Image (tube, coloured by chain):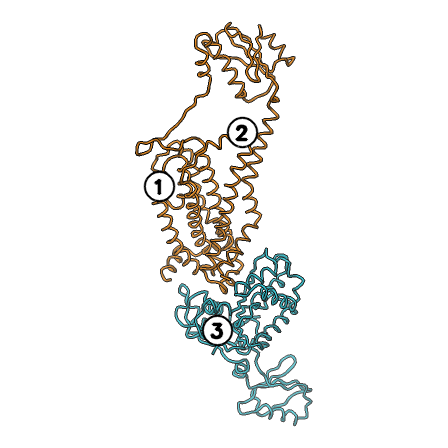
């Protein structure tokens, strides 16, 4: 049987059986389920039963708000004085009451009294009170349908004009950003764990001199290829678990989530670029990890050294809010082409703005060149230093060995 | 055809010569002891033979050809530091490395069972390596080295850290392998083991050969013309004896170059002295090693 395949199979099974791998693969869907469950639990404990009418008392000192009105499950009941409203509140005939002071039309202030300890007024109550006040102020001055329009949330339909001056097919909304952002975060995590797993494995084999036994059986190419493929496939498996579970979990959530999901339109090239950048990003990190693993005297030191490029890979996420605020800045173009940040930055940008084809092609081209060149150097460094242990060679020694190789 | 041929090997590391003009060969069915002080170049030589690194110049041939993938399947290597995958069971580890040597699973399983039983490790085959003692781990690694029935076996300090029982067991297995036509290169500091099981010895120091030949030839070369005697009473002056060295249990008589030991035996008997012991002195390999290496290894 092909030795590269044997190495691949062994390393792949080792990787997916690690407790850390299993935990990380499941943690995203499990945490999401927990989060949804907690939100639902908290909502159900704090909200009134769905069919219970919430009665809100009000004292109108202006003299124009005189409706006893019911809307949905909320009902407004007038009181002549604050004392009367307070007594009704104490008897729990009402859940809360508001005082519309005499200077409301100039100050805009309404006072609200409740038995509950709340950090802020529940949004639904706030909307209901606002609707009541606005409708009362506009009553008999503005037609009812105009009042309804004023009270409804603004409904903005956004369309994008392409460079050719045509209206683009897809619609942009918040949902377009969430999936690329989530994918970028998961991509960063997958790259980080892939890189550190590779370094950790190489470091342990080097420390225990197991690498010598392996070299007596397989070539460097077979060993490295087997390891890179195994950890890459394991990482891809992990990402797939996250991606497949995400929509299933979101659809388990409330109908608002489900409806929200239906409004999401991913960029046409998102999935293809997602796979391309995962593969290229992983290969780049793997190549760097081979070199670091070869020169590190121990697995621990290798992991520490790898943090340099692993953390660089997270830079696009650190500045994601700036990306959303200033999507057309040239700094993002640079980060989309710089090899270490390119995978995550490009995927983030896909959710925020269009990326010209030349930038994507340049980004991929630079990544490929970096991988090929890096692989060439890393294998040389690996061959020279993998059997040395106990001390890390200095930069000068590495350069001299590369020159003489 | 020689199993291993090394010709005019040179290797340097940043300014330091590790191997200098080293040449030797190993025949099939022979155990070559590779000895030398620390830093002598033994490990570098082994790494070059195994193609872990390239020499600066020189040539290595394994069974008449350059090292390649097919050759690797014919070689078993036991490094000095015994490292294994701690989380694998013994049997899984053995089968994995056997597969890397081109063995199919059923043959490997069958052979593994035989070797595990022979080494008394069969009951522990499903234990994880991390649950085993160091000695047990070494036995497992030894099995990994020979499971694929390699033609050439290179072992670096194979018996270090092993208890006497396991050491004797391994030595018997190594001797059996040699008797079955396998070629073995054994690198060790334990001279008594070299004397016991090796056919020939190569001693290196500062990267160069200082001693090379069969154990008998080497000992004969360094044999001092002296006898060790233990008698009842005093030995008087004897013609042909140029020096007497008193030891705790015997007297060493250094003979003149034209005096045969048999003559001295006759002369002692003529003195009417009861002889408890009369032995022609042959230096041990350890004494030869110390003499050549110029260091006092206690």
Q: Mark 1 sits on what residue?
A: A334
The residue sitting at 56% across, 13% down in the picture is A70
Q: Earlier in the sequence, mark 2 or mark 1?
A: 2
From the viewer's perspective, is the residue at label 3 or at label 2 nearer? 2
Q: Is disc 2 on the same chain as disc 3?
A: no
Residue neighbourhood size for the residue with mark 2, other residues' Cα within 10 Å, grouped as few (<14), some (14–19), many (≥20): few
Q: Which chain is cyan?
A: B
The part of the image, by quadrant, that contains residue B206 is bottom left
Front in this rendered view, residue A249 or B47: A249
The residue sitting at 49% across, 78% down in the picture is B212
- Could you tell me which secondary element the residue under label 2 belongs to? helix
Is A375 rendered above or below residue A24?
Answer: below
> Chain A hue?
orange
Front in this rendered view, residue B247 or A397: A397
- Where does the image place residue A142, in percent across and percent down from the top left? 43, 10
From the viewer's perspective, is the residue at label 3 or at label 1 nearer? 1
- Could you tell me which secondary element the residue under label 1 belongs to? helix
Front in this rendered view, residue A7 or A171: A171
From the viewer's perspective, is the residue at label 2 or at label 1 nearer? 2
- Where does the image place residue A121, in percent across and percent down from the top left? 54, 20
**Is disc 3 in contact with disc 2, using a CB cutoff of under 8 Å?**
no
The part of the image, by quadrant, that contains residue B106 is bottom right
Work out how far the residue at label 2 is from the one at label 1, CA to CA, in angstroms: 41 Å
Work out how far the residue at label 3 is from the one at label 1, CA to CA, in angstroms: 58 Å
Q: Mark 3 sits on what residue?
A: B204
């Amino acid at each position: 049987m092909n030795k590269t395949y044997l190495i691949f199979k062994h390393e792949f099974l080792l990787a997916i059986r690690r407790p850390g791998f299993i935990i990380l693969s499941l943690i995203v869907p499990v945490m999401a389920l927990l989060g949804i469950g907690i939100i639902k639990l908290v909502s159900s404990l704090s909200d009134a039963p769905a069919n219970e009418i919430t009665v809100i008392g009000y004292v109108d000192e202006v003299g124009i708000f005189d409706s006893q009105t019911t809307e949905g499950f909320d009902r407004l009941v007038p009181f002549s004085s604050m004392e009367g409203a307070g007594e009704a509140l104490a008897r729990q005939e009402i859940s809360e009451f508001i005082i519309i002071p005499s200077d409301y039309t100039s100050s805009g202030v309404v006072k609200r009294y409740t038995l509950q300890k709340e950090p802020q007024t529940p949004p639904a109550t706030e909307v209901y009170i606002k609707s009541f006040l606005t409708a009362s102020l506009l009553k008999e001055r503005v037609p009812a349908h105009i009042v309804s329009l004023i009270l409804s949330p603004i409904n903005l339909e956004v369309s994008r004009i392409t460079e050719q001056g045509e209206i683009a097919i897809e619609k942009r909304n918040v949902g377009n950003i969430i999936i690329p952002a989530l994918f970028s975060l998961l991509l960063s995590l997958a790259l980080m764990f892939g890189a550190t797993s590779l370094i950790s494995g190489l470091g342990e084999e080097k420390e225990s001199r197991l690498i010598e036994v392996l070299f007596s059986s397989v070539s460097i190419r077979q060993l490295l290829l087997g390891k890179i493929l195994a950890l890459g496939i394991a990482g891809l498996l992990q990402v797939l678990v996250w991606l497949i579970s995400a929509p299933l979990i979101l659809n388990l959530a409330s109908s608002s989530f489900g409806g929200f999901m239906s409004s999401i339109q991913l960029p046409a090239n998102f999935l293809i670029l997602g796979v391309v950048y995962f593969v290229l990003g992983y290969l780049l990190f793997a190549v760097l990890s081979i070199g670091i693993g070869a020169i590190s005297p121990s697995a621990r030191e290798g992991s520490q050294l790898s943090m340099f490029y692993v953390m660089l890979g997270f830079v696009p996420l650190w500045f994601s809010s700036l990306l959303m605020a200033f999507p057309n800045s040239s700094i993002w173009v640079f980060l989309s082409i710089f090899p270490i940040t390119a995978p995550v930055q490009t995927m983030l940008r896909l959710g925020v703005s269009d990326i010209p084809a030349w930038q994507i092609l340049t980004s991929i081209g630079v990544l490929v060149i970096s991988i090929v060149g890096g692989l060439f150097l890393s294998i040389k460094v690996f061959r020279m230093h993998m059997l040395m242990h106990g001390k890390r060679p200095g930069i000068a020694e590495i350069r001299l060995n590369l020159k003489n190789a | 055809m020689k199993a291993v041929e090394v010709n005019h090997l040179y290797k340097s590391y940043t300014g330091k010569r590790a191997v200098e003009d080293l040449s030797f060969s190993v025949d099939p069915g022979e155990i070559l002891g590779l000895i030398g002080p620390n830093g002598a170049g033994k490990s570098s030589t082994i790494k070059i033979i195994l193609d872990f690194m390239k020499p600066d110049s020189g040539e290595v041939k394994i069974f008449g050809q350059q090292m390649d993938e097919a050759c690797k399947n014919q070689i078993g290597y036991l490094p000095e530091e015994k490292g294994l995958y701690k989380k694998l069971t013994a049997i899984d580890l053995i089968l994995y490395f056997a597969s890397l040597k081109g063995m199919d699973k059923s043959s490997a399983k069958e052979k593994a069972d035989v070797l595990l039983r022979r080494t008394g490790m069969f009951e522990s085959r499903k234990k994880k390596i991390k649950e085993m003692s160091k000695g047990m781990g070494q036995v497992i690694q030894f099995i990994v080295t020979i499971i694929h029935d390699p033609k050439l076996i290179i072992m670096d300090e194979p018996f270090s850290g092993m208890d006497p029982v396991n050491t004797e067991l391994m030595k018997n297995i190594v001797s059996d392998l040699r008797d079955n036509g396998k070629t073995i290169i054994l690198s060790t500091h334990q001279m008594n083991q070299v004397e016991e099981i090796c056919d020939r010895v190569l001693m290196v120091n500062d990267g160069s050969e200082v001693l090379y030949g069969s154990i008998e030839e080497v000992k004969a070369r360094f044999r001092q013309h002296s006898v060790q005697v233990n008698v009842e009473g005093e030995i008087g002056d004897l013609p042909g004896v140029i020096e007497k060295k008193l030891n705790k249990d015997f007297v060493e008589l250094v003979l003149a170059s034209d005096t045969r030991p048999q003559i001295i035996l006759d002369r002692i008997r003529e003195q009417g002295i009861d002889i408890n012991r009369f032995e022609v002195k042959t230096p041990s390999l350890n004494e030869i090693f110390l003499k050549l290496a110029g260091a006092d290894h206690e």
